[in-house]
């Protein structure tokens, strides 16, 4: 019964992510990943709660930076593609 409840909860949580922007997804993934990593490192160091908080913050910032870089990369590609199309004419 607990497995069914856990599966239902996971489905509901994932369904809530359906309409997220790419920036929101990157921030969420970074935060969750950072929190998980921080919890492990914090537990090894003796304070899992502090490790989780620091990891979540670092993951959030990392996710947002990653998204910013990808947006700039896509913008540069589009600008280069448009310039290439104009030079053909």
Image (cartoon, rainbow, N blue to C red):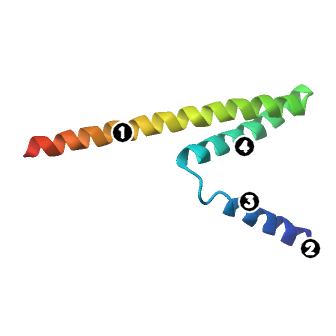
Q: Residue at x 14, y 43 (%)?
A: 86
Q: Quadrant of the N terminus?
A: bottom right
Contact (Cβ within 8 Å) of mark 2 with mark 1: no
Please state the horizontal and vertical placement of residue 6, each as a whole percent of the image.
84, 65
Q: Identify the residue position indicated by label 1 in the image.
A: 75
Taking 65 as reference, is 7 above or below it? below
- Packing grade of label 4 (10 A; few <14, some 14-19, many >=20) is some
**Secondary structure under badge 4?**
helix
Contact (Cβ within 8 Å) of mark 1 with mark 4: no
- Packing grade of label 3 (10 A; few <14, some 14-19, many >=20) is few
**Secondary structure under badge 3?**
helix
Contact (Cβ within 8 Å) of mark 3 with mark 2: no
Please state the horizontal and vertical placement of residue 64, each as a whole percent of the image.
58, 35
Q: Identify the residue position indicated by label 3 in the image.
A: 13
Quarter of image, res 29? top right
Contact (Cβ within 8 Å) of mark 2 with mark 4: no
- Between circles 2 and 1, the one closer to the viewer is 1
**Secondary structure under badge 2?**
loop
CA separation, marks 1 and 3? 31 Å
Q: Earlier in the sequence, mark 1 or mark 3?
A: 3
Q: Identify the residue position indicated by label 4 in the image.
A: 32
Q: Earlier in the sequence, mark 4 or mark 3?
A: 3
Q: Is residue 43 left or right of residue 73?
A: right
CA separation, marks 4 and 3? 13 Å
Q: Residue at x 54, y 35 (%)?
A: 66
């Amino acid at each position: 019964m607990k497995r069914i409840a856990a599966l239902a909860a996971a489905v509901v949580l994932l369904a809530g992510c359906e309409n997220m922007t790419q920036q929101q997804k990157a921030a969420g993934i970074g935060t969750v990943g950072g929190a998980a990593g921080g919890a492990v490192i914090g537990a090894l160091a003796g304070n899992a709660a502090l490790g989780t908080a620091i990891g979540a913050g670092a993951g959030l910032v990392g996710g947002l930076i990653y998204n910013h870089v990808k947006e700039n990369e896509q913008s540069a590609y589009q600008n280069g593609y448009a310039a290439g199309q104009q030079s053909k004419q």
